[in-house]
């Protein structure tokens, strides 16, 4: 009989005393004494088992704590290692981004400079073309003006020659002369 069952039996004896003709009788001392003796007889072995179980439980608990501490320490070290690697990788990536940004900025500056120079060249070409056109127009105007002068002199010479050769020596009306020319 185990100790827990014996204690339960003792409790039941105290809680439910015997009755005889409606009267409640006290507890049976012999029976209670016998239950207590049984408990005492079983007690040392049960206590040994409980003490051994407690020691084993404490040992297992201490092992678990030691293992948990080791696992936590390893996890902390691994987390620190991963964090350091991630930080290093982030710094490398950031440096690459800075270099790429510098390159892109330089490319952008070159592009801006190229556009600026292209605009200057185009503006200069437009100015030169305008100046050439004006120069050509002025030259054409000058040539036409000279031609007009030469033609005017030629017309005057032609008029004189015609008037000297004309039999009646009357000058022709001015409207006809211009109409012939």
Image (cartoon, rainbow, N blue to C red):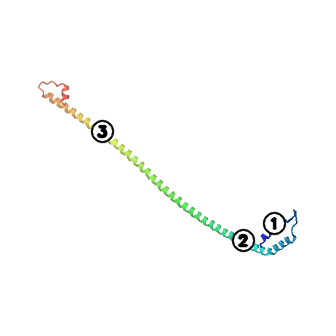
Q: CA distance from mark 1 to mark 3?
A: 136 Å
* Residue 114 horizontal side relative to residue 46, left or right: left
Q: Nearer the viewer, mark 1 or mark 2?
A: 1
Quadrant in which the C terminus is drawn: top left
Q: Residue furthest left?
A: 167
Instruction: Pick whichever, 104 or 34, lies toward us.
Output: 34
Q: Looking at the image, is mark 1 or mark 2 earlier in the sequence? A: 1
Label 1 sits on residue: 12
At 58% across and 64% down in the image, what residue appears?
A: 82
Q: CA distance from mark 1 to mark 2?
A: 32 Å
Quarter of the image for residue 74 reads bottom right
Label 3 sits on residue: 137
User: Which mark is drawn over residue 57?
Assistant: 2
Q: CA distance from mark 2 to mark 3?
A: 115 Å
Q: Secondary structure at mark 1?
A: helix
* Residue 42 horizontal side relative to residue 162, left or right: right
């Amino acid at each position: 009989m185990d100790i827990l069952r014996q204690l339960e039996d003792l409790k039941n004896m105290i809680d439910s005393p015997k009755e005889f003709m409606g009267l409640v009788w006290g507890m049976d001392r012999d029976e209670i004494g016998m239950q207590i003796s049984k408990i005492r007889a079983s007690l040392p072995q049960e206590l040994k088992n409980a003490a051994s179980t407690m020691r084993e439980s404490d040992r297992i608990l201490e092992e678990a704590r030691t293992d948990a501490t080791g696992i936590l320490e390893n996890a902390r070290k691994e987390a620190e290692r991963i964090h350091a690697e991630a930080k290093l990788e982030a710094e490398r990536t950031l440096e690459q981004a800075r270099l790429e940004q510098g390159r892109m900025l330089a490319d952008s500056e070159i592009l801006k400079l190229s556009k600026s120079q292209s605009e200057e060249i185009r503006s200069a070409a437009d100015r030169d073309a305008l100046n050439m056109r004006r120069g050509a127009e002025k030259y054409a105007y000058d040539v036409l003006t000279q031609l007009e002068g030469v033609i005017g002199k030629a017309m005057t010479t032609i008029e004189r020659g015609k008037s000297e050769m004309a039999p009646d020596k009357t000058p022709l009306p001015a409207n006809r002369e211009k109409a012939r020319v």
